[in-house]
């Protein structure tokens, strides 16, 4: 009897009772099929473990890879399950262990200089120098003094609706700076960037490549106030707020900048390119290498983007190691 190599035939071979004697060809086909099943199962389990670690889901979401997977029922179960598990759900309600930061309460903001019309200093005109981040506020030489100067800002209407001014968070001498477009509602309530569900996910992704927001990483947004209903930043808001971020970058002097999402990248790079076109490329921001990846909030809405995000994060870590090795200062 002659058989093909289709899955249906292979399943029949697998189910054949031992009392029937198989030909040598049938026996070889069955062995190949069993080895194939074992390989696919191991690959699927490896993918699950990889993503569980990348997203900080260290609870046993999946079982350890089995050494032998040969039954047709196991094949059917593996076909029904996704080989790349969905991003673990992050609880939307506050919990005692959410965002365990060194500082949980908003930092008090001192009274501004009474001579400032909008309760914050005005940016000074700068002359762009290729390969250098300009300094629109040269009178400030530390992150703390600069925050104290601008945290009362009332240059745009967002100051009238905000709860807290969201300056930034992390290592003031970081090699890596992550930038989003604007704070969300959770950030507005607490006064720190990326502290909601997206922030939890971001922390887990960073931990997967041995990074923390308070150790060689700084996180900030272009806007320092929460736009109503999480709408995109408006031109007049960017005009007033972007110089603050530029000053932060000038003080930090990072080796690598990563934009979290399309909006932030388009604003900073003055481009209309799509996220797909910007991802995977090493771009330039005033002489600093610049990468673009998905915003963590987008991953919560679109779990299918988890794999390209993991690729971006791995590239980010490799590039950061390379940059630090060539310039250890």
Image (cartoon, rainbow, N blue to C red):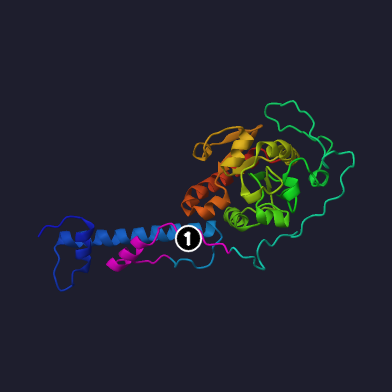
Main SS type for the magenta part?
loop
Q: Say if 181 sits above or below 212 in the image.
A: above
Seen in the image, is 62 located left or right of residue 225? left
> In this picture, which residue range is highlighted in magenta?
65-91
Task: Estimate the x, y position of residue 324 in percent, counting from the top left.
Answer: 65, 42
Q: Say if 194 sits above or below 255 in the image.
A: below
Question: Which of the 4 image quarters holds residue 117?
Answer: top right
Task: Estimate the x, y position of residue 287 in percent, counting from the top left.
Answer: 65, 32
Question: Which of the 4 image quarters holds residue 31?
Answer: bottom left
Q: Classify mark 1: helix, strand or loop.
A: helix
Question: Which quadrant does the C terminus fall into?
Answer: top right
Q: Residue at x 15, y 74 (%)?
A: 19
Residue 278 belongs to the span the image colors magenta: no
Q: Is residue 157 visible?
A: yes
Q: Residue furthest right?
A: 114
Task: Estimate the x, y position of residue 73 in percent, counting from the top left.
Answer: 30, 68
Residue 72 belongs to the span the image colors magenta: yes
Q: Residue furthest left?
A: 1
Q: How many marks?
A: 1
Q: Is residue 173 visible?
A: no
Q: Residue at x 74, y 40 (%)?
A: 244
Q: Residue at x 71, y 26 (%)?
A: 129
Residue nearer the viewer, 216 or 193 = 193
Seen in the image, is 223 located left or right of residue 50? right
Residue nearer the viewer, 179 or 280 = 179
Task: Estimate the x, y position of residue 149 in percent, counting from the top left.
Answer: 83, 44
Q: Which residue is mark 1?
A: 49
Seen in the image, is 202 located left or right of residue 247? left
Residue nearer the viewer, 316 or 137 = 137
Q: Residues within 10 Å of mark 1 (few under 14, many from 20)?
A: many
Question: Which quadrant does the N terminus fall into?
Answer: bottom left
Q: Residue furthest bottom?
A: 19
């Amino acid at each position: 009897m002659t058989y093909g190599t289709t899955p249906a035939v292979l399943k029949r071979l697998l189910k054949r009772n031992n009392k029937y004697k198989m030909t040598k060809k049938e026996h070889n086909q069955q062995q190949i099929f069993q080895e194939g099943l074992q390989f696919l199962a191991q690959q699927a389990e490896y993918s699950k473990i990889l993503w569980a670690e990348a997203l900080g889901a260290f609870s046993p979401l999946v079982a350890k890879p089995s050494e032998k997977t040969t039954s047709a029922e196991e094949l059917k179960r593996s076909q029904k399950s996704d080989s790349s598990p969905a991003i673990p759900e992050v609880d939307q309600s506050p919990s005692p262990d959410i965002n365990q930061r060194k500082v949980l309460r908003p930092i008090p903001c001192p009274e501004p200089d009474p001579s400032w019309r909008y309760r914050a200093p005005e940016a000074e005109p700068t002359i762009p120098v290729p390969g250098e981040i300009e300094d629109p506020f040269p009178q400030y030489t530390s992150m703390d003094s600069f925050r104290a100067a601008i945290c009362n800002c009332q240059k745009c209407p967002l100051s009238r609706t905000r709860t807290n001014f969201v300056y930034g968070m992390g290592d003031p001498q970081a090699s890596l700076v992550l930038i989003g477009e604007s704070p969300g509602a959770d950030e507005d309530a607490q006064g720190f960037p990326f502290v909601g569900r997206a922030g939890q996910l971001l922390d887990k992704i960073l931990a997967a490549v041995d990074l923390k927001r308070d150790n060689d990483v700084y996180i900030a947004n272009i806007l320092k106030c929460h736009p109503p209903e999480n709408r995109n930043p408006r031109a007049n808001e960017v005009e007033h707020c972007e110089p603050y971020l530029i000053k932060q970058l000038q003080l930090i002097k990072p080796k690598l900048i990563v934009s979290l999402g399309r909006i932030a990248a388009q604003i900073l790079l003055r481009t209309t390119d799509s996220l797909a076109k910007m991802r995977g490329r090493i771009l330039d921001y005033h002489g600093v290498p610049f990468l673009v990846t998905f915003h963590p909030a987008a991953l919560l809405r679109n779990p299918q983007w988890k794999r390209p995000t993991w690729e971006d994060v791995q590239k980010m870590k490799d590039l950061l190691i390379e940059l630090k090795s060539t310039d250890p200062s």
